[in-house]
Image (cartoon, grey):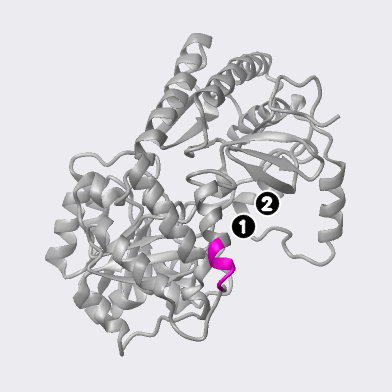
Amino acid sequence: MSNKVAFNENYPVITESEKLYERALPIMTPVTQTLAKGPGQYVKGVAPKYLKRGKGARVWDVDGNEYLDYNMGIGPLSLGYAYPRVDEAIIAQLKDGITFSMMHELEVELAELVHQVIPNAESIRISKTGADVTSAAVRVARAYTGRSKVLCCGYHGWHDWYIAVTSRNAGIPSEIKDLSATFDYNNIASVKDALDEDTACVILEPFVFEAPKDNFLQELKALCAANGTLLIFDEMWTGFRIAVGGAQEYFGVTPDLACYSKAFANGMPISLLTGRRDVMELFQEEVFFFTTFGGEALSLAAAIATIHEMMEKDVPGYLAEKGKRLKDGYNMLAVELGISGYTRCTGYDCRSLVSFDATAGNPLELKSYVQQEMIKRGILWSGFHNMSFSHTDTDVDYTLAAYREVLGLLKDAVSAGDVAARLKGTPVEAVFRKVSQFNMKPVVRS
């Protein structure tokens, strides 16, 4: 019998998942299209590898096991799976067509809506993925400033200018690597150390889990302006989630350019680049940024429906309320069980992260053990609380009850020193295995 969202006696049977995986191995390299969704991020032998359907905040794998999902498509499912208003908008547009031979009216309707809700949206470009628009932002910043270097902080996609600073940068010419550098979040001195007269732009996630301190974002904007450097917010995670207008609305800091993708179309593939009109004007003639599917109408319809729903029902407020209960509840349990010294939940209420300290053992093994036991209890868990409008108080109550049981098991395993021995499969892997290159400084040339 398939597992449910319940205190199941057994780990889920994942026979069909494993069969699909074996079929994929000889012909797909790697088998996943998104690292965060791949088998390396889940305990092998315990977690399912393939999902079949979703509804609300729940998903079912190909073996029929049901899970309460806190990954939510790795972010885009801000309202929930198969959300009626969005699906109805997609179905209605599907009857009229998907992609056309000329521009579609929904492009204008979405642009007007975005112009209304995002503070810096004097001008808007529409594309398909986050990497599309972050790379377009970097390109137009270089064109506008006549400079070459990029400073970044956070995760910004798979293109050369960003991946050059990570450990997975094979295939990127050294000349390109020399043009990218990083700085430390909340450390304005690290920005000053890296900023020079050839810095075209500073791009960062306005926050990931750590909150800005000492007016960091305001200081960063002033520093960029004084240096003639454009400030770009990568709002893939913050946009439409912390506030409908994103982090720039929430913190009152308006960047020169901003990029969006996750959250505002409830799972449909679409992205936005918004910014100053004088900068964006370069896309008219000088800077090339076009794609066949930029005006794909199903995603446009989904985005319009999602944004209206967010505005009308104060979805960011709902995410914060439910997320706060979950985050605070986890931390209270950790204190109650006497394990707050090595595990905690941090971040903003709409999206928080459970972390583990090396003082109690290998953090990846600790995470894997908690994941293994949460999956047994019908919760698809990878350390994140990506809240959606479909998560209910009942869901949060059940999750905290599961945490109480699982964290008790973790405490016992840490005390016994046998966390690894209790794992039923291979532990989860790190995405980027080396971070020593972060906080690089620009190359000094003679």
**Image quarter hosting the N terminus:** top right
- Residue 56: in magenta span: no
Q: Which residues are magenta?
A: 92-96
Q: Secondary structure at mark 2?
A: loop
Contact between labelled residues 1 and 2, with CB atoms less than 8 Å apart: yes
Q: Nearer the viewer, residue 227 or 98?
A: 98
Residue found at x 28% / y 45%: 186
Position of residue 276 relative to residue 62, above or below, is: below
- Residue 94: in magenta span: yes
x, y percent for residue 446: 28, 79
Residue found at x 46% / y 54%: 262
Disc on res. 38: 2
Disc on res. 34: 1
Place residue 383 in its image quadrant.
Answer: top right
Position of residue 439 relative to residue 131, above or below, is: above
x, y percent for residue 435: 49, 51
Position of residue 105 relative to residue 301, above or below, is: below
In the rendered structure, the answer to whether residue 56 lies left or right of residue 150 reads right
How busy is the neighbourhood of tag 2: few (under 14 within 10 Å), some, or many (20 plus)?
some
